[in-house]
Image (cartoon, rainbow, N blue to C red):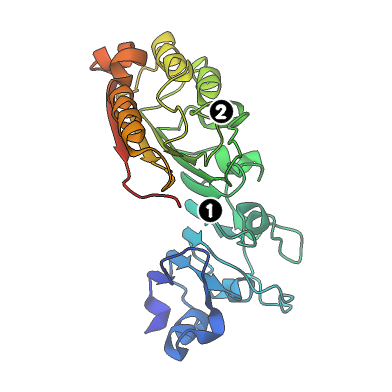
Amino acid sequence: MFTMLESYSLSFTPVSSYVTLDFEKIGLQMREILIHPALMLRHLRLEGIRNFPFYTLLSCYPNLQHLKLIHMHFDKSPTPKGMLPLKTIKLCSFTCGSADLTEAVTSQQLLSLQQYDGEPVFDVSRVKHLDITSNTRPELATGRAILLHLETIILRANVAAYSAIDLTGLGKLLLSSSRHLKEIMIFTDIGLAEGHDPLCGLCEELEVLGSHENILGALSFTLTTYFSNECSTGDEWGKLDQVIDKFEWPMLKDVSIEISVGQCLSPDSDSTSDEGNEVNFRRRLKTLPQRQLPRLFSKSRKGLKFRYSISDEYDF
């Protein structure tokens, strides 16, 4: 029965992603499925599990093509000799990382894993879809091999308060896949860091990519920030408008921007003043496309999808 499985997903998703489930506490039947050879398995998704004996189980999935590892913590005990797969596993899509767990497995750890003859356990040279989450910065220092044939790249950067995300170098890295790359999605959380570029250096990186032949068809940027940040002002949005307008971008049809703002107000603040500030803040957000993205706002070929939200939660 298990040998014919083509897709398997095992996840533990509590309220907080800081919490994980120990592998030994997973039901016996679920564990038996995982340790049973599944030669037909193509899709594997694991989420929120601690002390998972992943390296030991790799030999069970020799034909794996699509791998998702989210908030995963691997067993650090040595891999028994002979338990690694006999041949390199060739991946087509790869998702890895955690926004919160500092000890969660990283793509760099995973892709540096070698067989006993020195060959890599995973061949990522044909990966078309990459989704990386990091609690420091987009984790792309895993080698250029994973970027060669990308069609879709998703970067999720969630950093600590008072820190800034820096996308420096992304454009140069993506040049190797510019003739294949169809979509870029970036999700950032800039915490409480004030005075930082809300686009995290994206404009400069797009300029590098736009100056070369490319087939990029969709670009989306999702920013999570706080009421105390002036994310609706500054020149960076205007720079984005200029960069998109400056280059040909022959295939670019969709540009999407979403801003999610937490109020971050204290219970002792002046409610009247706060209400006035919020009204002005909402007005600036609502009119951001017309004020700072006029070219994108007016061109249907590179139509802009803009959305914003302000939460009603309070940070005491």
Q: Is residue 91 visible?
A: no
Q: Residue furthest top?
A: 246
Residue 304, picture quadrant: top left
Question: Does residue 106 appear left or right of residue 277 in this picture?
Answer: right
- The circle on residue 99 is 1
- The circle on residue 162 is none
Image quadrant in which the N terminus is located? bottom left
Q: Residue at x 55, y 57 (%)?
A: 100
> Pointer 1 and pointer 2: residues touching (CB < 8 Å)?
no
Q: Position of residue 156 (x, y in %)?
A: 49, 45
1 or 2: tag closer to the N-terminus: 1
Q: Amino acid at mark 2?
A: His
SS label for mark 1? loop
Q: Is residue 290 above or below residue 221?
A: above
Residue 139, picture quadrant: top right
- State the residue position of label 2: 196
Q: Residue at x 44, y 50 (%)?
A: 315
Gap in angstroms between the C-alphas marked 1 and 2: 20 Å
Question: Does residue 164 appear left or right of residue 258 in this picture?
Answer: right
Question: Does residue 70 appear left or right of residue 280 in this picture?
Answer: right
Q: Is residue 251 above or below residue 45?
A: above
Q: Residue furthest left?
A: 300
Q: Amino acid at mark 1?
A: Ala
